[in-house]
Image (tube, grey):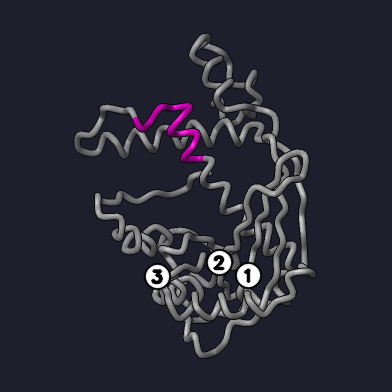
């Protein structure tokens, strides 16, 4: 569910400047904020923990060289044959395995409140179990081993990946990329309306309503009552 958004200019680095203002009005005490490696910034980490009394999990890449280099060194030292937690799923014509390890962040990285690295290995194979790809991703968090075990850490990381599904739905189901609306605040308004529509359908029945199917049904029957889509009556008023 999208609960906030900020306008970002053409220069993508402005997303960094929008980070704190986006979170500022939200009550997020005790929650875990996940963000891409772009936002693995010292100011962002301090803001989340000190100002908002929340927790963070950031992706770690080369934009923070000291943090990333230390993560790679730690990753080289873990026992790859014995993950702390592992999942295996079949679907979409492939088998996906996720393996996770956690390790303390060296004090020499000097990243605010950083306690653990999360190391996630993703292996994809055909349905005949022939490996097609394998990659390792690194994350940093202020959470401790007492706050979250490896299973919980992996779930938090994978939940962040679900954000990409929102962009996919907007780009494909709502054909956002081909929109010709580019004047003034209209693109932002339409993005808000698309997010609202997606959020309502997901809130109604996230496990059984397909957003594309729901929008097609609403297009055919614009006067359909929302309860037929499983949306609680309270939202219909």
From the viewer's perspective, is residue 72 above or below residue 57?
below
Displayed quadrant of residue 98 = bottom right
| Count of numbered marks | 3
Q: Helix, strand, or loop for circle 1? A: strand
Residue at 45% from the left image edge and 81% from the top image edge: 66
Residue 152 pos. (x, y %): 71, 62
> Taken as a whole, is the magenta stretch helix, strand or loop?
helix
Which residue, given by chain and number where applicable, does mark 1 sit on?
Answer: 118
Side of 208 where 23 appears, left or right: left
Residue 48 pos. (x, y %): 48, 70
From the viewer's perspective, is residue 116 above or below residue 135?
below
Residue 174 drawn in magenta:
yes
The magenta segment is: 166-177
Which residue, given by chain and number where applicable, does mark 2 sit on?
Answer: 57
Where's the N terminus, which quadrant? top right
Residue 233 drawn in magenta:
no
Question: Which residue is farthest front?
Answer: 130
Q: Which mark is residue 63?
A: 3
Side of 29 where 148 appears, left or right: right
């Amino acid at each position: 569910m999208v609960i906030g958004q900020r306008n970002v200019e053409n220069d993508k680095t402005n997303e960094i400047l929008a980070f704190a203002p986006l979170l500022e009005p939200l009550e997020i005490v005790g929650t875990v904020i996940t963000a891409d490696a772009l936002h693995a910034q010292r100011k962002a980490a301090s803001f989340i923990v000190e100002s908002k009394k929340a927790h963070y999990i950031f992706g770690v890449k080369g934009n923070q060289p000291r943090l990333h280099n230390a993560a790679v060194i730690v990753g080289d030292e873990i026992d790859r044959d014995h993950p702390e937690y592992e999942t295996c799923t079949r679907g979409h014509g492939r088998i996906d395995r996720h393996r996770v390890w956690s390790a303390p962040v060296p004090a020499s990285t000097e990243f605010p409140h950083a306690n653990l690295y999360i190391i996630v290995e993703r292996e994809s194979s055909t349905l005949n179990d022939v490996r097609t790809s394998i990659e390792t991703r690194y994350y940093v968090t202020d959470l401790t081993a007492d706050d979250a075990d490896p299973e919980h850490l992996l779930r938090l990381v994978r939940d962040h990946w679900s954000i990409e599904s929102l962009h996919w739905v907007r780009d494909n189901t709502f054909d956002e990329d081909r929109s010709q609306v580019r004047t003034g605040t209209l693109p932002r308004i339409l993005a808000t309306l698309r997010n609202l529509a997606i959020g309502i359908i997901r809130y109604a029945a996230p496990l059984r309503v397909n957003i594309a199917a729901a929008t097609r049904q609403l297009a055919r029957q614009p006067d359909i009552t929302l309860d037929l889509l499983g949306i609680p009556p309270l939202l219909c008023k």
